[in-house]
């Protein structure tokens, strides 16, 4: 099988590639950082399976599927990669189109690939047509938080928050463009944002896992965490155990301990 992994998260691409390369029935594993790059690759190469993230910048996974189907050249087996919570996934699971829920395990990835091999092209096309409307609805339901800023209430998409930093009795919410200061304890914010992929790496810092690019162990026993925007943070020993929440993205890395 020839497989293309399309995901804007470096850790997810790396982990999926590692699992797929261990399969004897996989001939090639290519990667793309977004849908645009993936479409360009597919003009020159044929793939049997597409592991496709749903939420990506510029073009979403669903938009990419629409583009492929409109071209009429045949669509490879599509396995959606999603960070939707389990309750949201249950809403379309009955349609039997496969998906990989982040964070994922090697076993789950292999089951998804096995599923893709066992179903015909016609069956996959029918199931894909059934599932797309449900995915479109879920993709529009990005969780938002309301904050008070300069005398008004602002609504912010949780996915757009890169990091939250405590500053005295306040917390600074940093986005890719701009920031907001709100009067709140970071411990309270940590509890509320944990279900949305935020990890506490310091007593005063929360990071959005979707924006993490790499983690490097230091000689001091701490870790250096780098975000996609280039900013770096030290993960203190006290919070090092929280890195286990990313463990399924770092298959084979047993060195991260509590």
Image (cartoon, grey):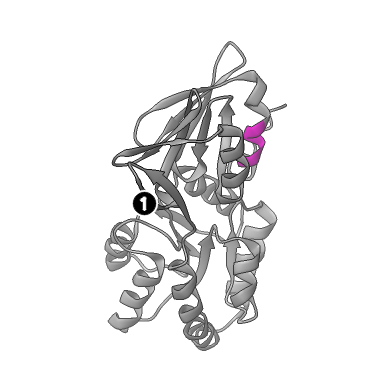
Q: Is residue 193 above or below residue 231?
A: below
Which residue is depicted at the point 57% across and 11% down?
A: 219
Q: Position of residue 84 (x, y in %)?
A: 56, 61
- Residue 120, how many percent across, how many down? 55, 84
The number of callouts visible is 1
Q: Residue at x 42, y 25 (%)?
A: 232
Residue 185 against residue 56 in the figure, above or below: above
Outermost residue toward the right in this view: 258
Image coordinates of residue 202 in percent, x first then y, are 57, 25
Q: Residue at x 35, y 71 (%)?
A: 63
**Observer-nearest of 134 and 213:** 134
SS for callout 1 = loop
The residue indicated by pointer 1 is 33
Q: Which residues are magenta?
A: 242-246
Q: Is residue 85 visible?
A: yes
Residue lying at the far front of the rendered structure: 151
- Location of residue 224 in the rendering, given as x and y in whole percent from the top left corner: 50, 23
Q: In the picture, residue 139 is in which quadrant?
A: bottom left
Could you tell whether 236 is left or right of 10 in the image? right
Residue 245 among those drawn in magenta? yes
The structure residue drawn at horizontal position 59% and vertical position 81%, both measured from the top left corner, is 119
On the rendered structure, is 154 left or right of 245? Answer: left
In this rendering, position of residue 76 left or right of residue 189: left
Quarter of the image for the C terminus: give it: top right
Extreme-top residue of the structure = 220
Residue 251 in sight = no
The prevailing secondary structure element of the residues shown in magenta is helix
Q: Residues within 10 Å of mark 1 (few under 14, many from 20)?
A: some
């Amino acid at each position: 099988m020839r497989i293309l992994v399309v995901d804007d998260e470096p850790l997810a691409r790396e982990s999926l590639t590692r699992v797929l390369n261990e399969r004897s029935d996989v001939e090639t594993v290519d990667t793309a950082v977004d849908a645009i790059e993936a479409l360009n690759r597919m003009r020159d190469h044929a793939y049997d399976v597409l592991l496709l993230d749903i939420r990506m910048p510029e073009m979403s996974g669903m938009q990419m599927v629409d583009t492929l189907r409109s071209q009429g050249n045949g669509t490879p087996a599509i396995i959606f990669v999603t960070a939707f919570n389990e309750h949201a996934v249950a809403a379309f699971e009955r349609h039997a189109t496969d998906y990989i829920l982040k964070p994922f395990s090697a076993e789950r990835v292999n089951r998804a690939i096995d599923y893709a091999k066992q179903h015909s092209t016609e069956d996959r096309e029918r199931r894909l047509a059934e599932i797309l409307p449900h995915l479109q609805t879920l993709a529009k339901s990005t969780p938002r938080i309301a904050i008070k800023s300069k005398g008004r209430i602002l609504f912010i998409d949780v996915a757009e928050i890169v990091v939250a930093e405590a500053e005295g009795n306040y917390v600074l919410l940093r986005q890719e463009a701009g920031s907001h200061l709100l009067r709140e304890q970071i411990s309270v914010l940590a509890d509320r944002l944990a279900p949305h992929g935020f990890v506490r790496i310091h007593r005063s810092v929360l990071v959005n896992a979707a924006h993490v690019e790499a983690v490097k162990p230091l000689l001091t026993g701490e870790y250096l965490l780098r975000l996609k925007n280039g900013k770096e943070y030290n993960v203190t020993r006290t919070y090092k155990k929280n890195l286990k929440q990313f463990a399924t993205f770092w298959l084979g890395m047993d060195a991260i301990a509590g």
